[in-house]
Image (spheres, rainbow, N blue to C red):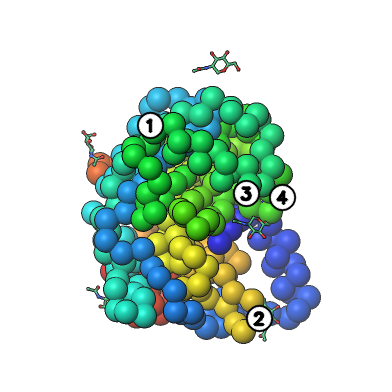
Amino acid sequence: MKFTGASLITAVLTICASLSVKASDIGTPKSVTYDGGIVMTGLVNIYFIFYGNWQDEHQVQLMDFVDSLSNTAWFNTLRLYNDRLGNNVTGPLYFAAAINDNYSHGRSLQGNATHIDIIEKAIESAYLGKGTDHAGIYFILAAEDVDEEGLCTKWCAYNSYTSDFVYAFIGHPNKCPQLCIPELNRNVSPNGDPALDATVNMIAHELVELMTDPHNDAWRVGNSTASEEISEWCMPPNATPEEWFGPNVQKLDSGASWNLQVNDTKWLIQSVWNPVAKKCVMSS
Ligand SMILES: *[C@@H]1O[C@H](CO)[C@@H](O)[C@H](O)[C@H]1NC(C)=O
Ligand SMILES: *[C@@H]1O[C@H](CO)[C@@H](O)[C@H](O)[C@H]1NC(C)=O
Ligand SMILES: *[C@@H]1O[C@H](CO)[C@@H](O)[C@H](O)[C@H]1NC(C)=O
Ligand SMILES: *[C@@H]1O[C@H](CO)[C@@H](O)[C@H](O)[C@H]1NC(C)=O
Ligand SMILES: *[C@@H]1O[C@H](CO)[C@@H](O)[C@H](O)[C@H]1NC(C)=O
């Protein structure tokens, strides 16, 4: 559900060590569970709310990414998830609309009630189309000068839902690069801006979880007392660095790492748990 990165992971690993979790347990699911809820099937419209100042060029890169992501072999893994009625995730993803929110709720946001209000106001404005899209996904993308009480203390991004829509909040990775930007690309990244590149990775992470578990009652990994949505399974501390981005990470001349090309643009995107092969994969 929550995207957390490196520093927090160190803390979690330390705690695990004292509970004597063996290194060999990494990457071995306790269990992958399906609790009977729906997955997101058919065409899924994606909406972006750029909260605060964003460069136009970055907005276009983020929109192009989600608009083309379902054409990749990476997305095929999601198509292996189905629900009780046998309906699989299919895609495609379609980039429907974006809106700029000029700090309507200030620069210090406080919790999901505020996030939900931002989305509802955006929907009411009608710039995102007519009415609420119950089968779409709303993303709030926070600009660099936006604080959030949970950002960097609990997560870099998270997803959730209301009775009307599902959504994700993506914090700006420069708020805490150690936590939110993968070490491989913290200094140099394929598209020249480590925060932008890390944002795309977080969008992918949350998309996977929303498609396979939109209402927190479908696909999860864990055990009888604790479980998480599936993207958590393919990143540290649950996965090795190689499982996280797959075995075929390539380097540009600049030294930047990438592993997935989406409509001519190279990105570094985390792997996805394949429920049939039972491992983290970059393509299916
Ligand atoms: C793919 O890239 C081309 C060239 O950059 C662009 O014109 C096109 O709109 C992109 N397609 C999508 C679906 O983003
Ligand atoms: C739908 O999901 C099931 C269960 O993982 C899988 O066996 C099947 O191949 C999937 N169907 C398609 C068309 O991908
Ligand atoms: C955003 O709001 C500020 C005042 O709060 C204003 O100065 C600025 O022009 C606004 N920007 C846009 C793009 O509307
Ligand atoms: C809002 O956040 C709280 C605490 O993080 C959580 O318990 C609650 O389920 C969330 N509600 C929604 C609608 O996301
Ligand atoms: C389930 O996993 C959590 C977190 O890893 C652990 O603290 C807990 O002891 C586990 N419970 C069982 C019943 O294995």
Q: Is ligand 4 less than 8 Å from the beta carbon at label 3?
A: yes
Foreground tag (1 vs 2): 1
* Disc 1 target residue: 127
Disc 4 versus disc 3: distance between alpha carbons?
15 Å
Q: Residue at x 47, y 45 (%)?
A: 139
Residue 3, picture quadrant? bottom right
First along the sequence among labels 1 and 3:
3
User: Taking 6 as reference, is 31 above or below it?
Assistant: below
Say if 92 sits above or below 143 in the image.
Answer: below
Q: Is residue 272 above or below residue 143?
A: below
Disc 3 target residue: 112
Mark 4 or mark 3, which is nearer to you?
A: 3
Quarter-wise, where is residue 207 in the image? Answer: bottom left
2 and 4 marks in contact (CB < 8 Å): no
- Res. 225 mark: 2
Residue 235, horizontal then vertical, whole percent: 53, 63
Q: Position of residue 98 (x, y in %)?
A: 39, 35
x and y percentages locating residue 64 in the rendered image:
31, 39
Binning the other alpha carbons within 10 Å of mark 3 as few (below 14), some (14 to 19) or many (20 upward) gives some
Q: Please name the amino acid that badge 1 sits on.
A: Tyr
Given residues 246 and 269, the one toward you in this image is: 269
Q: Is residue 269 left or right of residue 172?
A: left
* Residue type, mark 2 in image: Thr
User: Type of residue at label 4?
Assistant: Thr
Q: Quadrant of residue 39?
A: bottom left
Figure quadrant, ligand 2: bottom left
Residue type at tag 3? Asn
The residue at the point 35 percent across, 73 percent down is 81
Name the residue beneath numbered marker 4.
Answer: 153
Q: Compute the Cα span from label 2 to label 4.
A: 23 Å
Residue visible at 71% across and 50% down in the picture: 153
In the picture, which quadrant includes the N terminus? bottom right
